[in-house]
Image: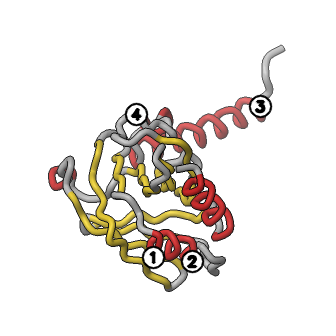
Amino acid sequence: MGPTADTKRFFWIVGGVLGCLMAISFFFFDPRIIFVDWRDFSNLTVPIKGDLEVANDSGLWRRASLRLICGSNGSLYLLLRARMPGPREFLKLGSDEAVELMAGGKNLKLNAGVKLIDTGPVDTLATTELSVAELDGLATLFRPTPSGRLSFMTMERGVFLVEVSDEASIRKFTGHCSSNK
């Protein structure tokens, strides 16, 4: 005795829904992004002692991550790994650009520039060393906001993220990193 008509219909519906979800993910997102190691720091020129993820895109599959990186000499940097929107031909490796972060109506313009280090399924951008004032501004930016959203703007483009850290954890991480110089 085989499956009933209702069972067959159920499997056709479930298969159709899963097929649609897979097709949507392949059309709108690069499927290679599923296999990205978000903590791969091999293309950075500074030896890394630690990192703290401060924001990501919080999707079904992570497509972007913003991390605070602690160098082995106690210096701190921001590292964005995301697929930058817009035409790809305008992204130049090594280009030094301004950065602005926005969250909850607050803006933080960094004096530290950002460099495009790598392109691929995700682009890797790293700031130069952050100053004490910039680190304080960054921590303040992560005070609880109604939206919990963060915008990372550079190269006339923007990536929109969701905050996953708070002011206290950022201050604790920066203090720990700076004390281990």
Q: Earlier in the sequence, mark 2 or mark 4?
A: 4
Q: Earlier in the sequence, mark 3 or mark 1?
A: 3
Quickly name the residue at label 4: 42
Quickly name the residue at label 1: 102
Asked if 160 appears above or below 53 in the picture, the reply is below
- Residue at 26% x, 59% y is 86
Q: Which residue type carries mark 4? A: Ser
Q: How many residues crowd around disc 4 within 10 Å: few (fewer than 14), some, or many (20 or more)?
A: few
**Going by the image, does 16 lie left or right of 48?**
right
Q: Earlier in the sequence, mark 4 or mark 3?
A: 3
**Do tag 3 and tag 1 residues touch (Cβ < 8 Å)?**
no
Q: Residue furthest right?
A: 1
Instruction: Please state the horizontal and vertical placement of residue 119, each as a whole percent of the image.
Output: 29, 43
Q: Earlier in the sequence, mark 2 or mark 3?
A: 3
The residues tagged by marks 2 and 1 sit, at their Cα atoms, a distance apart of 11 Å
Quickly name the residue at label 2: 140
Regarding mark 2 in the picture, which secondary structure is present there? helix
- Viewer-closest of 114 and 162: 114
Q: How many residues crowd around disc 3 within 10 Å: few (fewer than 14), some, or many (20 or more)?
A: few
The residues tagged by marks 4 and 3 sit, at their Cα atoms, a distance apart of 50 Å
Regarding mark 3 in the picture, which secondary structure is present there? helix
Instruction: Please state the horizontal and vertical placement of residue 38, each as a whole percent of the image.
Output: 50, 41
Q: Which residue type carries mark 2? A: Thr
- Residue at 58% x, 50% y is 180
The residues tagged by marks 2 and 3 sit, at their Cα atoms, a distance apart of 55 Å
Asked if 44 appears above or below 91 in the picture, the reply is above
- Residue at 61% x, 63% y is 170
Q: Nearer the viewer, mark 4 or mark 3?
A: 4
Quickly name the residue at label 3: 7
Q: Which residue type carries mark 3? A: Thr
